[in-house]
Image (cartoon, rainbow, N blue to C red):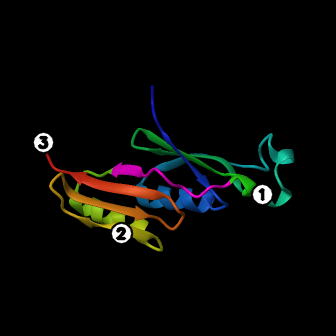
Amino acid sequence: MQVNVHLNFAGQCESAFKFYEKYLGGKIVVMMTWGESGMAEQSPPAWHAKILHATLALDGCRLTGCDVLPDSYEKPQGFSVFLRIDTPDATERVFGLLAQNGTVRVPLQQTFWALRFGMVVDQFGTPWLIQCAKAG
């Protein structure tokens, strides 16, 4: 069994996944638009350039996402994407990038359980927990 995260967007999936690919170091392995799919006739013509399915391969994990149809989008709530990073410097860099044009919920800081921990909602509305765990 494998658990992966799937994110819904309101039209900015392509921008989000290109941002994640560039700054998280993964690789987009699938990026299909509504218009390229068998769902083209069931979507509004203005939505044909939006993403029906995207997959980002990232260190053995997969992050998937799509632009849901306009009347189906719901703002993310009740979850966060947990990102564990190996070094404090890399943790600070990634947190800073995700915080650009986003909202910091908990500033990145040292805690009793982690060398660094913080919470941020990025510019695309995705909530993140970022952590650099203590050794041992």
Q: Is residue 20 visible?
A: yes
Residue found at the far bottom of this picture? 101
Tell me, yes or no, whether the two marked residues, 1 and 3, touch with CB atoms within 8 Å.
no
Q: Residues within 10 Å of mark 3 (few under 14, many from 20)?
A: few
Seen from the viewer's position, the closer of residues 19 and 4 is 4
Task: Say what secondary structure mark 1 lies in.
Answer: helix
Quarter occupied by the C terminus: top left
Q: In the rendered image, which residue does mark 3 sit on?
A: 136
75 falls in the magenta region: yes
Seen from the viewer's position, the closer of residues 86 and 126 is 126
Kindly identify the residue that appears in the image at 83 percent across and 55 percent down: 44
CA gap between label 1 and label 2 equals 32 Å
52 falls in the magenta region: no
- Pick whichever of labels 1 and 3 is earlier in the sequence: 1
Kindly identify the residue that appears in the image at 45 percent across and 64 percent down: 121
Q: Residues within 10 Å of mark 1 (few under 14, many from 20)?
A: some
Task: Say what secondary structure mark 2 lies in.
Answer: helix
104 to the left or right of 74 = left
Task: Say what secondary structure mark 3 lies in.
Answer: loop
23 to the left or right of 68 = left
Q: In the rendered image, which residue does mark 2 sit on?
A: 96
Q: In the rendered image, which residue does mark 1 sit on?
A: 47
Seen from the viewer's position, the closer of residues 21 and 133 is 133
Tell me, yes or no, whether the two marked residues, 1 and 2, touch with CB atoms within 8 Å.
no
**Compared to 7, does 119 lie above or below?**
below
Which residues make up the magenta segment?
73-83
106 to the left or right of 87 = right
* Amino acid type, callout 2: Gly
> Residue 103 at what x, y percent from top left?
43, 70
- What secondary structure is the stretch in magenta mostly built from? loop
* Amino acid type, callout 3: Gly
* Amino acid type, callout 1: Trp
